[in-house]
Image (cartoon, grey):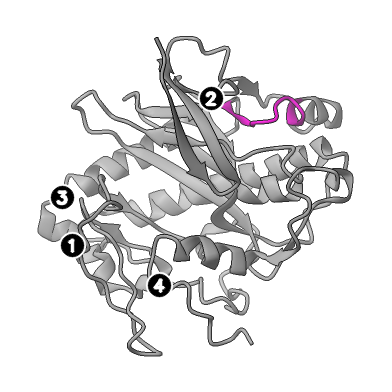
Amino acid sequence: MTTSSTIKTHFGEITLQEEIVSGDFDIIPIIDLTALDSPGSCRKEGACSRNLHGMLRNHGIPAQDIEAVQAAARQFFGLPEEGKLECFLGKSNVRTLRAFTTLFFYIFLSSDSASTATARYIYGEQKNLSESFDIGYEIAGDPQKRPGDILPEDSFELYGGNLWPSETALPGFKDTYLHHFRSCIQLSRRLLKVFALAFDLPETFFDPLPPQADYECFAILAQDSVPALQVLNSRNQWVTATPIPGTLVVNIGDFMSLWTGGKFRSTVHRATNLTGENRYSIPFFFGVNYDATIQALPSCEGGELAKRGPIKAGQYVRDRLSKSYIGFGEKPKSVG
């Protein structure tokens, strides 16, 4: 017997069937990217699902590279606590949220100073139940950039430096992560052409929106062998996404939902590790320049979310962050 409950998402409430489905992987599609550069194939693959969440096969990132970044993650989280705390979020500009966060850590951004932000522990309903190490976009991680290039103007106060472990503590860690970062950016830019074709647009449609790394467009996940990821299927049931060797998980984000007027939906998902084993999950979040305007595309103006007005990408991100992190609700100094 199944029971029902309701969860809230950014696009409304969803009634859930509490039964957890496992083993039926026809529900979560496997998307073969062998012919990704073929326009006809791209159009077919891109239009395959309203809730585009699947396993990418033949994605072009070598298995040894994925294993290398997984091994680097295991090395970092295997450090003594004092070693990990050298990269603690409280030592960085916490407005960027790029650093190590501990178990049960929650961020409070102080507004008592125009130029500083402080972090403190807040234990409550939204406490973090996992350790994490977060990095964001930097020039060295973009294969289309040169060493002398600079970041765009930070109108929404969302850019910032990454806080890396020292080369002495973890030799090669930064290089390994930036190599994976570059590979994911290249794959993401190829996938963006797939989405353009799926929306009946020229494959170069998104090129004028300089891509950056964040969570708004879609996420590419490299998971290890420990099953924990669950996604909500079209019947509103949780489906266990058992890891498949050689694949990456892709899930579209809020901007794709807004661009398509709701015709494509960001998939509700969660991680529930009941194995008792440590799990290492490495997501890459891809977005656009924060000054880009997000609104329904010409081919999607009849969608149920198309009535939402245009919004700057950076403002949307700040609005989302303000729901979790006190301080992001404040207006950036550079925005009038």
- Dividing the image into 4 quarters, which one contains the C terminus? bottom right
Q: Nearer the viewer, mark 2 or mark 1?
A: 2
Which quadrant holds the N terminus? top left
Q: Which residue is mark 1?
A: 85
Q: Relative to residue 327, is residue 249 depicted above or below? A: above
Q: Which label sits on residue 236?
A: 2
Question: Which badge, 2 or 1, comes first in the chain's sequence?
Answer: 1
Mark 3, residues whose alpha carbon is within 10 Å: few (<14), some, or many (≥20)? few
Disc with the residue nearer the chain's start (4 vs 2): 4
Q: Earlier in the sequence, mark 3 or mark 2?
A: 3
Q: Which residue is mark 4?
A: 95
Q: Are marks 3 and 2 in contact (CB under 8 Å)?
A: no
Closer to us: 100 or 3 = 3
Q: Which residues are magenta?
A: 45-55
| For discs 1 and 3, the disc positioned in front in the rendered view | 1
| Secondary structure of residue under mark 1 | helix
The label shown at residue 79 is 3
Q: CA distance from mark 4 to mark 3?
A: 25 Å
- Which residue does the image show at 23% across and 55% down from the upper left? 124
SS for tag 2? loop
Quick check: 82 left or right of 266?
Answer: left
Quote the CA–CA distance across marks 2 and 1. 40 Å
Secondary structure beneath disc 4?
Answer: helix
Label 2 crowding class (10 Å Cα cut-off): few <14, some 14-19, many 20+?
Answer: some
Q: Nearer the viewer, mark 4 or mark 2?
A: 2
Q: CA distance from mark 1 to mark 4?
A: 18 Å
Amino acid of disc 3: Leu
Give how far across and how far down residue 160 sits, in percent: 45, 72
